[in-house]
């Protein structure tokens, strides 16, 4: 009998179905790799197993018993499910030992003794190959070592099932080897592991079987011996495109390639990206691809004046300095951020207030003593709601009551009256239903056709391939490949993202810094 | 169907300010019916007159709270303006115009310093204004040697005590200042920026809202309004004291919150604060009329504020 079986689970968020009848099993003494693109549903399925979410239908059976409705991360840990995620959950101000035992500190008459704690942490740290003083504050360690502390913390619960969700993304080779050693030990002792990684080589090095998820459904489960990299990539990608994407701009004809509107040279954001060159051309949609967290987000934030940066930026051939969002807005650069509810819209404010906020200078000019013109405001709001077909009960409705897709429309629509020339969008369709996605793709293409230069980041390979005229692939903060025209395919994009090299025809690959 | 329901629910929630006036009305009727001394025109007049002092401080507080700040220095500023005006006026004689001007200028300066600390030094508003209020209290003690002067400033005397068409000038002043603050908060660009900053600073910055100038306008306006309240109080009592501002620190914040404005900022209405200030003044007067001792009165007032908050002005979980 399998240690864990996931049986026909489905899950929807706000009517948006993210998992549909997903089933798979993990046997004792087995390592299962869970593979899929960003947004395929991997994290959701793992959250169901660790009790962060409950399924709408179907069930999760662990060790022969269906998990109760009142499943929770705490109970999952007590039952023997340990998990490590890409996002750290350490308290940076507490010691390594305190973090390892967080929530279950050994105490003597109610007192926790630092020395006991350290002594008990040491064998766990040794198991994960960490040679640090357990009394060091966790925040002082480099990222990779913090990730190993997370693993030690998971091991402190003595798990029978270990979930590693992108847990190796910040690790170097030796550290990955240490993680694999722990997983193999667990396997030999009859435990099991679920392993999620974007690095194909790691998946094949450690797993016994691979389950591929696509659009919230299992496309295949294969034994490692029966498959290879190309097979898995094929299973991950390749969806029906139909008319989801609008036709692309015609390729620049020969010598008279258009002048870039925004020319970026050597853009460097400390600890995020370095030496980025980009040419944003009116009429064209440029994409920034790559695995999650390779610096895409910081490139956009720098270009909107939200991140401190170095490098040469020129707008229309003239050097510009973008030290704050106000600088960027003055140069008619607009930004639709990734964390929509934090930076994109005010969720507790009305649709009207959100739509007019960037246009306050026009609506409340100094000649009116900065009094807002209600009439012009209402007309503008009505026009924008109509133009983008924002589905709101009224302009006075709070934005948090709108669906994610309509919130995103508001975050985009509010810039249109400011007459932007450069439009920066981060993950423009994350968590949005397919119909609204299509509307947004077509809107972005229309805006480009009207002469805007558009820059998009996305973790969705299909989106970049379908929408963009050119894609620069980032890997660890540098551009490793540029794909355009017939070269821009999902397979080449995924390969460049995963391997961090150009996808040369001969397949050897080499790192290119443009 | 569900969306129209959502709107009506949102509409109800938006009218938390109306709750303040509702509770005020009920309390007032109850006071007239069941308590002694609340049924005369004179008592009504006296009530709105005394509510004006708190009300003027509270509208300034509303401006700051709306952009998710808070001003704990208002008690110090009230005392500052009264003490300085009294001292300058008793020194120079005359109509007291110079005293008023000096006092209000100093208040504006305190507001600007508060804003500078919050914006440029990134000190949390609560800490910054508590510190500046404490510094003010100490500085006044040094400045007056512990014995503040009393002064008769004719202009302030009539402003605090006289009436026009039977309405106390203080109340008229309060309404006029409320109208000005209403324009600033609800009709002008600055007000939109204040609401936006209160609803979420990150999104506001990313939309081009200038946080610094908005903060300077709000904190300076708040301090000047507290200064005006101090001047009217000086006219009302004819004397200044170092502790005369103390009640207004927490009561002004309570007026804002009972008026339906979110203490976290970004939601609310200035007129709610007017209701809140009237309500708190009425409750204080009621407790006084029952001959409760000062200590008991404070305990009961505190409990009432908590109770009313629970009834209609709780922060939403999101």
Image (cartoon, rainbow, N blue to C red):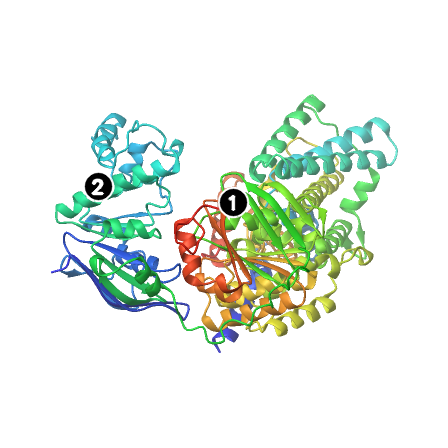
Is B233 drawn above or below residue A231 in the view shown?
A: above
Pinpoint residue A274: horizontal percent, then vertical percent.
Answer: 53, 41
Q: Which residue is painted at 66% across and 36% down in the image? A: B116
Depth check, front residue: A365 or A514:
A514
Element under label 1?
loop
Element type at marker 2? helix
Q: Position of residue A503 (x, y in %)?
A: 43, 54
Residue B275 in the image: above or below residue A102: below
Residue under numbered circle 1: A513
The spot of residue A265 in percent (x, y) is: 61, 45
* Chain to which mark 2 belongs: A
Q: Nearer the viewer, residue B237 or A144?
A: A144
Q: Which mark is residue A332?
A: none
Which is nearer the eye, A19 or B174? A19
Q: Is residue A403 left or right of residue B260?
A: left
| Structural crowding at the residue carrying mark 1, measured as other residues with C-alpha within 10 Å and reported as few (<14), some (14–19) or many (≥20) | few
In the rendered view, does B267 fall on the left or right side of A33?
Answer: right
Identify the mark at residue A181; answer none if there is no mark: 2
Measured Cα–Cα span from mark 2 to mark 1: 35 Å
Disc 2: CA contacts within 10 A as few (<14), some (14-19) or many (>=20): some
């Amino acid at each position: 009998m399998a240690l864990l079986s996931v049986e026909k689970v489905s899950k929807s968020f706000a009517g948006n179905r993210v998992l549909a009848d997903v089933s798979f099993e993990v046997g004792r003494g087995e390592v299962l790799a869970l593979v899929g693109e960003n947004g395929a549903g991997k994290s959701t399925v793992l959250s169901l197993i660790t009790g962060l979410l409950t399924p709408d239908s179907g069930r999760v059976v662990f060790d022969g018993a269906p998990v109760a409705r009142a499943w929770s991360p705490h109970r999952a840990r007590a039952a023997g499910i340990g998990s490590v995620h890409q996002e750290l959950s350490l308290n940076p101000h507490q010691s390594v030992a305190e973090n390892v035992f967080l929530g279950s500190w050994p105490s003597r008459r109610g007192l926790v003794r630092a020395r006991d704690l350290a002594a008990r942490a040491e064998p766990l740290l040794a198991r994960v190959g960490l040679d640090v003083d357990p009394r060091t504050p966790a925040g002082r360690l480099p990222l990779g070592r913090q990730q190993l502390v997370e693993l030690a913390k998971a091991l402190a619960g003595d798990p029978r099932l270990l979930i590693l969700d992108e847990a190796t993304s910040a690790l170097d080779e030796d550290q990955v080897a240490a993680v694999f050693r722990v997983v193999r030990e667990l396997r030999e002792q009859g435990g099991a592991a679920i392993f999620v990684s974007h690095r194909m080589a790691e998946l094949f090095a450690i797993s016994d079987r691979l389950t591929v998820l696509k659009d919230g459904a299992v496309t295949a489960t294969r034994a490692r011996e029966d498959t290879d990299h190309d097979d898995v990539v094929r299973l991950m990608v390749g969806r029906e495109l139909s008319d989801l994407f609008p036709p692309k701009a015609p390729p620049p004809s020969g010598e008279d390639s258009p002048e870039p509107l925004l020319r970026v040279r050597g853009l460097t954001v400390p600890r995020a990206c370095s030496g980025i060159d980009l040419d944003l051309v009116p009429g064209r949609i440029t994409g920034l691809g790559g695995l999650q967290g390779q610096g895409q987000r910081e490139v956009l934030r720098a270009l909107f004046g939200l991140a401190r940066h170095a490098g040469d930026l020129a707008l229309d051939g003239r050097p510009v300095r973008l030290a704050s969002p106000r600088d960027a807005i003055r140069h008619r650069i607009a930004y639709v951020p990734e964390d929509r509810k934090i930076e994109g819209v005010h969720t507790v404010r009305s649709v009207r207030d959100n739509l007019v906020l960037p246009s306050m200078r026009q609506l409340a000019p100094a000649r009116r003593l900065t009094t807002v013109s209600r009439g012009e405001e209402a007309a503008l709001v009505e026009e924008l709601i109509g133009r983008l077909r924002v589905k709101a009960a009224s302009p006075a409705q709070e934005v948090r009551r709108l669906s994610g897709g309509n919130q995103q429309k508001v975050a985009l629509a509010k810039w249109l009256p400011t007459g932007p020339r450069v439009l920066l969008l981060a993950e423009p369709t994350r968590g949005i239903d397919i119909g609204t996605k299509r509307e947004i793709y077509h809107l972005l293409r229309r805006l480009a056709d009207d002469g805007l230069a558009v820059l998009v980041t996305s973790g969705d390979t299909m989106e970049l391939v379908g929408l963009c005229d050119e894609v620069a692939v980032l890997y660890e903060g540098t551009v490793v490949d540029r794909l355009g025209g017939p070269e821009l395919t999902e397979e080449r994009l995924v390969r460049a993202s995963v391997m961090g090299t150009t996808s040369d025809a001969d397949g050897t690959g080499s790192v290119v810094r443009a | 169907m569900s969306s129209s329901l959502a709107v009506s629910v949102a509409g109800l929630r938006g009218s938390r300010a109306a709750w303040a006036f509702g509770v005020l009305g009920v309390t007032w009727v109850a006071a007239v019916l069941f308590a002694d001394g609340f049924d005369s025109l004179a008592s009504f007049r006296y009530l709105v007159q005394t509510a004006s002092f708190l009300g003027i401080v509270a509208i300034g507080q509303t401006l700051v709270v709306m952009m998710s700040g808070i001003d704990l220095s208002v008690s110090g500023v009230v005392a500052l303006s009264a003490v300085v005006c009294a001292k300058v006026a008793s020194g120079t004689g005359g109509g007291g115009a110079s005293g008023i001007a000096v006092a209000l200028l100093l208040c504006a300066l305190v507001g600007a310093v508060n804003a500078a600390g919050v914006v440029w030094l990134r000190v949390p508003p609560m800490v910054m204004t508590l510190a500046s209020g404490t510094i003010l209290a100490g500085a006044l003690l040094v400045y007056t040697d512990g014995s503040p002067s009393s002064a008769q400033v004719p202009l302030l005397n009539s402003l605090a005590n006289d009436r026009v068409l039977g309405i106390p000038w203080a109340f008229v002043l309060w309404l006029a200042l409320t109208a000005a603050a209403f324009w600033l908060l609800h009709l002008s660009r600055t007000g939109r920026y204040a609401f936006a900053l209160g609803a979420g600073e990150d999104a506001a910055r990313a939309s081009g809202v200038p946080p610094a100038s908005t903060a300077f306008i709000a904190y300076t306006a708040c301090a000047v309004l507290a200064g005006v309240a101090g001047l009217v109080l000086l006219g009302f009592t004819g004397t200044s004291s170092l502790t005369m501002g103390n009640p207004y620190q927490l009561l002004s914040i309570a007026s804002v919150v009972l008026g339906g404005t979110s203490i976290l900022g970004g939601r609310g209405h200035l007129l709610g604060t007017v209701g809140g200030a009237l309500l708190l003044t009425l409750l204080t007067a009621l407790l006084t009329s029952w001959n409760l001792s000062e200590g008991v009165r404070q305990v009961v007032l505190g409990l009432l504020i908590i109770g009313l908050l629970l009834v209609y002005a709780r922060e939403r979980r999101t």
